[in-house]
Image (spheres, rainbow, N blue to C red):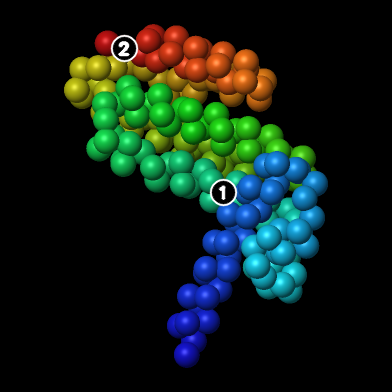
Amino acid sequence: MPEPQRSHARLNRARILEVARDLLTADGDASLNSIAKQAGIGPGTLYRHFPNREALVLAVYRTEVQRLVDWVPDLLKEGTPLSALRTWFQRLAEHIRIKRGLGDALSAANHATVTNETYGPVIEAIALMLRAGEENGTVRPGLDPDDVLMAMGCVWRTPHTPEGLAQSERLLDLVIQGFKA
């Protein structure tokens, strides 16, 4: 019966990460006990998966970046490369807002490490969407993924208020217009 235990452990881990993402985004000081309780598991189960708060925060962040990167092929199947870029950057902005909430729980060294290790996959995802747009003639050729990421920085720097989110949408429209062929 080892397989059901491993399967159960994977489900527990996924549930912990989901709950931790939500609770830590809402309150960067959410306790590990509150996360375990909300996930419907005991504290011991949480600690078997994540020996300390920082390990959990790092896992949440890495999981969210991987989901975002893995989403690109589906976005490109669903719509145009420009609409994929727009939708993806909306989600990236949400993700960076999550990261801000999680960032307080990370040491400076781990914050730098996780940012460095996730930068490459993010740039590769942007490059994939840009290439698709170049190939179908909707995106200006020669855009640098690093420049695109930098230009999009305005989107997640707006305040997390209704006015700030509306401004974020306007800025996103402006930047996407600049990518058009």
Residue at screen point 68% across, 60% down: 38
- Classify 7 as above or below 156: below
Marked residue nearer the N-terminal end (2 or 1): 1
**What residue would you read off at disc 2?**
180
Asked whether the residues under the numbered discs 2 and 1 touch, taking CB atoms below 8 Å apart as contact, a structural biologist would say: no
Q: Quadrant of residue 156?
A: top right
Q: Residue, x 57% and y 61% (percent of image)?
A: 15
In 3D space, how far apart are the residues under numbered discs 2 and 1 (Cα atoms)? 31 Å
Q: Is residue 147 visible?
A: no
Rendered position, 1 above or below 127: below
Q: Which residue is mark 1?
A: 62
Left or right position of 73 against 90? left
- Answer above or below: position of 152 versus 69: above
Q: Nearer the viewer, residue 120 or 96?
A: 96
Pick the residue in front: 158 or 73: 158
Q: Which residue is located at x 41 percent, y 29 percent? A: 87
Q: Position of residue 1 (x, y in %)?
A: 47, 90
Extreme-bottom residue of the structure: 1
Where is residue 118, by image quadrant?
top right
Quarter of the image with the C terminus is top left
Number of numbered labels in the structure image: 2
Q: Amino acid at mark 1?
A: Arg
In the rendered structure, the answer to whether residue 94 lies left or right of residue 133 reads right
Which residue: 56% across, 36% down? 95
In the structure shown, which secondary structural element does the residue marked by tag 2 occupy? loop
**Crowd tier of the residue under label 2, counting other residues whose Cα lies within 10 Å: few below 14, some 14–19, many 20 or above:** some
Residue type pointed to by label 2: Lys
Residue 151 pos. (x, y %): 51, 16
**Crowding near pointer 1: few (<14 within 10 Å), some, many (20+)?**
some
The local secondary structure at tag 1 comes to: helix
